[in-house]
Image (cartoon, rainbow, N blue to C red):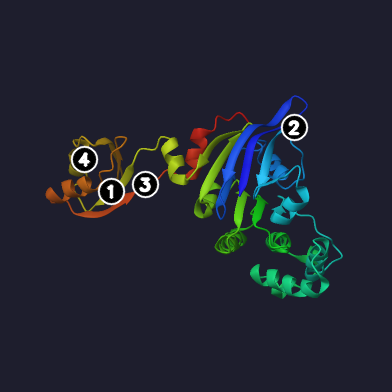
Amino acid sequence: MIRINALTKKYGELAALSNLELTINAGDVFGFIGPNGAGKTTTMRILATLLTPTSGRAFIDGHDVLTHGRTVRRLVGYMPDFMGVYDDLKVFEYLEFFAAAFGIEPRKRKGIVEGVLELTDLQSKKAAPVDSLSRGMQQRLGLARVLIHDPKVLILDEPASGLDPRARIEIRGLLRELKKMGKTIMISSHILSELEEISDHVGIIEHGQLVFSGTLAQLRQRAGQQSKVRVRVVQDHDKAVELLSALPQIADVHREGEIISVTFHPGQDADGIVARTLVRADIDLIALEPEQLKLDDAFLQLTRGLVH
């Protein structure tokens, strides 16, 4: 659905993007990650036809963003990190204005606006002045606005920025609903744990270059994660550590209080042998839980801190 080939954007001698290559499949939620100034917003603005690249090409559903801008704008709903509002309009009027801007027939506008208000749970606020809404409500209104013309692709730049925890949870729920509707969603965020919950694939960009693109499982593998488990036993903690340390499949065992952390050698996934070893030694096992590398940790491992 989104394809980027050798995309470069320069401001004088500064390269905001440098030969960026990226593909996003239809129906995917793609988490776009990078430090401030890495090139996320530049990429998104080019895809939304708001910025012209220095060189390279980008396509939305097979349409070149440079030569078929009008078609692309019909396919894309772009939400910037900060949404300006019209202070003198009510919520319903605001959405009707954008429905008119997209050329939606007057007889269809009311129904479409009612539909996006329901989807974003803003029906109770439709008569409220736009500038009276909370930050979370304004973000939902921003999503309602980009859904007016029923785009195939949503490009969302920091949609959870500045929101309180409840509002962030509500936005995540809305994004899940949009995914169920078949939308392709490209979303940037500095809250990596939230991207981890909703993304099918992630891309990490730094200094205008793509460091990684793939699934979360592939990211963990790329970051060099060794398989780990956390073990809890009723008693005999020292004996458990001694027994597990002797197993050839295990690279490291260390204990922190009641928790025994076990790291396997690369390529080993020996949860079963851990359990069998403890049970055979008459050590009562309470829990054995996999310990996965978090997206935050993988990001820190793969980026080099060239951009601040």
Q: Which residue is mark 1?
A: 231
- Residue 114 is situated, as x and y percent measured from the top left of the image, at 72, 74
Q: Which residue is mark 2?
A: 54
Of badges 4 and 2, nearer the viewer stands 2
Mark 4 → mark 2, Cα distance in angstroms? 57 Å
- Asked whether the beta carbons under mark 2 and mark 3 sit within 8 Å of each other, the answer is no
> Within 10 angstroms of label 4, few (less than 14), some, or many (20 or more) residues?
many
Q: Amino acid at mark 4?
A: Leu
Rendering quarter of residue 223:
top left
Residue 23 horizontal side relative to residue 282, left or right = right
Q: Residue furthest top?
A: 13
Q: Earlier in the sequence, mark 3 or mark 4?
A: 4
Of badges 2 and 3, nearer the viewer stands 2
Q: Which residue is mark 4?
A: 244
Mark 1 → mark 4, Cα distance in angstroms? 11 Å
Q: Which residue is mark 3?
A: 291
Q: Is residue 304 above or below residue 295?
A: above
